[in-house]
Amino acid sequence: MGGLFGSVSKENCIDDLFYGTDYHSHLGTKRGGLAVKNSKGFSRSIHNIENDYFRSKFESDLPDLKGNKGIGVISDYDSQPLIIGSHLGTFGIVTVGKINNIEELVSEEFAKKMHFSETSGGVTNPTELAAMLICEKGSFEEGIENAQERIKGSCSLLLLTEEGIFAARDRLGRTPVIIGKKENAFAVSSETCAFPNLGYDIEKHLGPGEIVFLTPEGYEQKKKPNDKMQICAFLWVYYGYPASDYEGINVESVRYRCGCSLAKNDDAEIDFVAGIPDSGTGHAIGYANEKRIPYKRPFVKYTPTWPRSFMPQSQSTRDLVARMKLIPVRSMIDGEKILFCEDSIVRGTQLQDNVQILFDYGAVEVHMRPACPTLIYPCDFLNFSTSRSTLDLAGRKAIRELEDSDDKFLDEYATAGSEKNMAMTDKIRSRLRLTSLKFQKLEDLVAAIGLPKEKLCTHCWDGSSYF
């Protein structure tokens, strides 16, 4: 997915920029980048963070990155930030999102005899494309609006100029952008968890398509929010960090309510509840408290030396790292009936291995309760599962087995409690060798978040969305 952070201060902002960007490391593992503006001009640093941590790669760069304005990014796709020279002036830019019509937009630019310098594997850098769309207009505000209107998908961005930082949330608000404030400084972030330890208070959640301009003295709205919003519901289920708030709604609180809802709809007789770490933990605590049964940790996570496994490009590497990080506790497994809460089941490959380990270690029963419905549609908006095709989704695999096709009766399969939905669920349960499997109902997930359904993007579960 990726995450962005920016800071404008009356003093040197590099510490806030460094640690604020680092607080987005859970959102991607491909590239990290920082850019600052000072009296000498613009400076930037970009590193590959696939096999190491952001802090380790950037700490030695900090003495060369002084300034009172800066932007940073954790990217799961392209190299950022970019420093662009244009008729609007020199600026730095970072983006988060996914441009679905990138080939169409690139062709339009080529027809204007424009060129691109940033490519990887023959693919145009989407951040450079966004910058080019901005430069087509006579001001930064008009340019950002132009980019937002022409991009299909999503694109939230920060734009570092001589005077300050433009912050813009994508047209339908699928990714969050939040302003923080403290004495002598303002910050803008994808995650509010970056604020507390740096001394910032939440000042404002940008609305969909809203544009603001930040300086050390304050911020000014340059474009009002759009009426329609579809923020990604998966942020609360999986992506988001537990300490973060989106639209004023805390991630951990939603996960707790998801677990409570799973418990209310369940009659499994078990010895204790566990969460698949880390994002399944909040769901499991909510379940255990609602049922008044023990919460235990039969799997513990070992992280000191293993790199993160969120988005390595090789699936085999993802699976290996995830497996090596999760260690079973045999004494808590042998002879037990265990129910696990998980954020979701995407492919199910790693979960299948974990379930087998539990039975090998003597578990009598293993039940699974994902906190969201079955994923049936690939994400079109946030680069989630970009290396995983539709055919890899556990739900689509089950549909293919039942129908000899993976694109028939999708509406029926997405409807909780329908005959086809139950058949799909049982196929997944059988493949994973689970004692029982029950997915969260979409209406219960929506209720746990607390926003109206029409303000949430639920495309990966039911195929619905605005474009």
Image: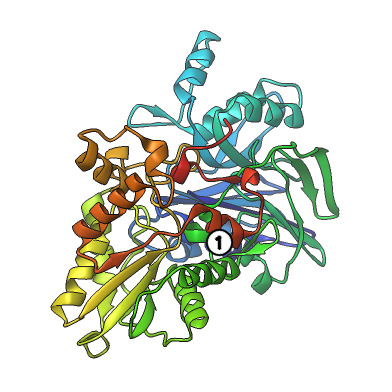
- Position of 402 with respect to 103 (left or right) is left
Q: Is residue 449 visible?
A: yes
- Position of 95 with respect to 390 (left or right) is right
Residue 461, image x, y percentages: 45, 46
Give the vertical position of 390 relative to 57 (above or below): above
Which of these two is toward me, 323 or 81? 323
Residue 332, image x, y percentages: 27, 88
Residue 39, image x, y percentages: 72, 48
Q: Is residue 377 visible?
A: no
Which of these two is toward me, 63 or 424? 424
Q: How many marks?
A: 1
User: What residue is shown at x 60% (from left), y 70% (from top)?
Assistant: 253
User: Of all residues shown, which one is farthest toward the front?
Assistant: 419
- Quarter of the image where one finds residue 224: top right
- Quarter of the image where one finds residue 354: bottom left
User: Of all residues shown, which one is farthest toward the bottom?
Assistant: 331
The colouring scheme, among rainbow, by chain, secondary structure or one colour, is: rainbow
In the image, what residue type sits under mark 1?
A: Leu
User: What residue is shown at x 34% (from left), y 47% (from top)?
Assistant: 419
Which of these two is toward me, 143 or 177? 177
- Quarter of the image where one finds residue 93: top right
Give the vertical position of 125 relative to 256 (above or below): above
Give the vertical position of 309 relative to 148 (above or below): below
Give the vertical position of 262 relative to 363 (above or below): above
Residue 351, image x, y percentages: 27, 63
Mark 1 is surrounded, within 10 Å at the Cα level, by few (under 14), some (14 to 19) or many (20 or more) other residues, namely few
Quadrant location, the C terminus: top right
Residue position for label 1? 62
Task: Say what secondary structure mark 1 lies in.
Answer: helix
